[in-house]
Image: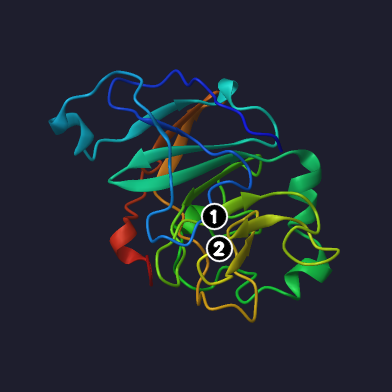
Amino acid sequence: MTDATLTQDVSRRDFLYVAPAGMLGVAALHAAWPLVDQMNPSADVLSATAPLTVDLTAIAPGQQVIFKWRAMPIFVVRRTEALVEDLKSPSLLAQLRDPQSEAIQQPSYARNWSRSVHAEFLVLVGVCTHLQCIPAFSPERGSLLAATPGGYLCHCHGSKYDLAGRVFKGVPAPLNLPVPPHHFPDGNTLVIGENPAGETFDLSQVQQL
């Protein structure tokens, strides 16, 4: 993917990060997340933990956008049909540490083969489960390992995740990337930080953040 800046129509509490593919990996603990301050928010808004509402129509197929919620980067990826099909590849699953998401790193409604409510959209906490660096979006096939689908590469210590946030074997990170509470009130809207009706998941329940 080429670098792109996406202007997002979000609520007044929302903050948009744009993730140029392959450019987020740096060795510093807090890698660069260029903040696009859409609304010139005040300090109290910056510290808010309220849910974020995202207009999904502005995210192109194959693109990742990064939002800030509860002081954490939240990756939102619109996966193409090809990327979704790759998630079920037996050769990929054989290289993953927890391919069936058995560890509690996601809510029950995202404990499935795509780790999402809707397979097209991936929603992750973008913090490596090794030492909390920010993994770089690397969706090109073969960019992580030869002949494998792309995903995420943490440049701090080499941990790798697929495009469902599932960690590869043989890397320092012990667990899949967490999936935050989220739901889709309609086909064009994502709410980050709020569960579907009847669910009570919170990130405090994950094994490791």
> Does 190 sit above or below residue 81?
above
Categorize mark 1 by other alpha carbons within 10 Å: few (<14), some (14-19), many (20+): many
Please say whether residue 37 is visible from this viewpoint: yes
The mark found on residue 25 in the picture is 1
127 or 163, which is in the foreground?
A: 127
* Left or right: 40 as drawn, with respect to 33: left
Name the spot of residue 121 as percent of width and height, x first.
60, 40
Mark 1 is on which residue type?
A: Gly
Residue pointed to by mark 2: 155
Instruction: Write the residue at 35% across / 32% down.
Output: 52
Q: Are marks 2 and 1 in contact (CB under 8 Å)?
A: yes
| Placement of the C terminus among the 4 image quadrants | bottom left
**Which residue of the protein is positioned furthest toward the left in this rendering?**
44
| On screen, residue 97 above or below 193 | below
Query: Where is the N terminus found, in terms of image quarters?
Result: top right
* Rendered location of residue 161, percent (x, y): 61, 63
Using the rendered view, name the quadrant where residue 127 is placed: bottom left
Query: In the image, residue 33 lies at what x, y percent?
Result: 43, 42
Question: Residue 145's spot in the image, x, y percent?
Answer: 77, 67
